[in-house]
Image: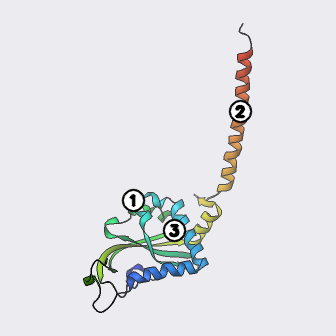
């Protein structure tokens, strides 16, 4: 993946359209789409979206799939910077998070003929400051979350076993509740001495 510091993401005046091309390419590739869904699942499971503005980020580059990691770059308007505490949730899981503020060119809203580039049918471009956040996640973490287990403090916890244990405990509580109710009913039916 190109480093967030390279500025090659928005190299020329077609930068806004590069984002649209990236999204189109993702939808054309089932593997990229599945990888992006796994990437998003990690962000969701680690509660990144609970922090302010994380849910409104736009994908601008990626997923960049490497041997051991997957990386994506997301964009936010300058005034809606994502809360850095959300990104810090990823750090204990060997994820890498980088922030950078840049200026990109976007098409202006066309309201009258002066909003076009002279002699064309293209909108004029204006500069806007945005935040870019590059997130790199280990494939092993994506796999652990996808399969329902995650290693916490050197212990491997299978979430399916945990769910099964809760269900068994609920069954026992239900049985105990029925038994307690029957005992109470029998005590009420017995004549008082």
The single residue placed furthest to the bottom in the displayed view is 119
Residue underneath mark 3 = 94
Q: CA distance from mark 2 to mark 3?
A: 45 Å
Question: Can you give x and y, in whole percent of width and height, for residue 113 in the image?
Answer: 27, 83
Q: In front: 97, or 180?
A: 180
Q: Residue at x 49, y 58 (%)?
A: 47
What is the residue that sits farthest to the top in this orientation? 193
Does label 2 or label 1 sit earlier along the sequence?
1
Q: Measure the alpha-carbon separation of dots 2 and 1.
A: 44 Å
Question: For residue 153, which quarter of the picture?
Answer: bottom right
Viewer-side label of 1, 3: 1
Which is more foreground, mark 2 or mark 3? 2
Q: Which residue is mark 2?
A: 176
Where residue 124 sits, quadrant-wise, is: bottom left
Label whose residue precedes the other's in the sequence (2 or 3): 3
**Residue that carries the numbered disc 1 in the rendered image:** 52
- Of callouts 1 and 3, which one flags the residue occurring earlier in the amino acid sequence? 1
Residue 60 sits in which quadrant?
bottom left
* Closest to the observer, 78 or 117: 117
Q: From the top left corner, tell me how far across and down residue 6 is, in percent.
A: 39, 84
Q: Is residue 164 left or right of residue 126?
A: right
91 lies left or right of 175: left
Position of 174 relative to 160 (above/below): above
Measure how far apart labels 1 and 3 are at the Cα level: 22 Å
Count residues near mark 1 (Cα–Cα under 10 Å), then give few for <14, some for 14-19, many for 20+.
Answer: some
Identify the secondary structure beneath mark 1.
loop
Regarding mark 3 in the picture, which secondary structure is present there?
loop
Contact, CB < 8 Å: mark 1 with mark 3? no
């Amino acid at each position: 993946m190109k480093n967030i510091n390279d500025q090659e993401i928005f190299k020329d005046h077609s930068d806004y359209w590069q984002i649209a091309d990236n999204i189109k390419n993702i939808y054309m590739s089932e593997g990229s789409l599945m990888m992006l869904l796994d990437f998003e699942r990690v962000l969701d499971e680690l509660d990144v979206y609970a922090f302010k503005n994380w849910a409104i980020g736009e994908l601008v580059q990626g997923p960049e799939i490497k041997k051991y990691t997957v990386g994506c770059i997301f964009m936010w308007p300058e005034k809606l910077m994502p809360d850095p505490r959300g990104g810090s949730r990823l750090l204990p899981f060997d994820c890498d998070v980088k922030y950078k503020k840049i200026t990109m060119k976007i098409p202006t809203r066309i309201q009258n003929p002066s909003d076009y580039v002279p002699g064309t049918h293209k909108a004029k471009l204006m500069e806007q400051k945005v935040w870019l956040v590059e997130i790199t996640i280990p494939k092993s973490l994506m796999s652990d979350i996808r399969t329902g287990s995650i290693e916490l403090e050197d212990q491997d916890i299978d979430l399916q076993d945990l769910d099964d244990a809760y269900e068994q405990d609920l069954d026992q509580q239900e049985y105990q509740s029925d038994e307690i109710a029957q005992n109470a009913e029998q005590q009420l039916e017995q004549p008082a001495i």
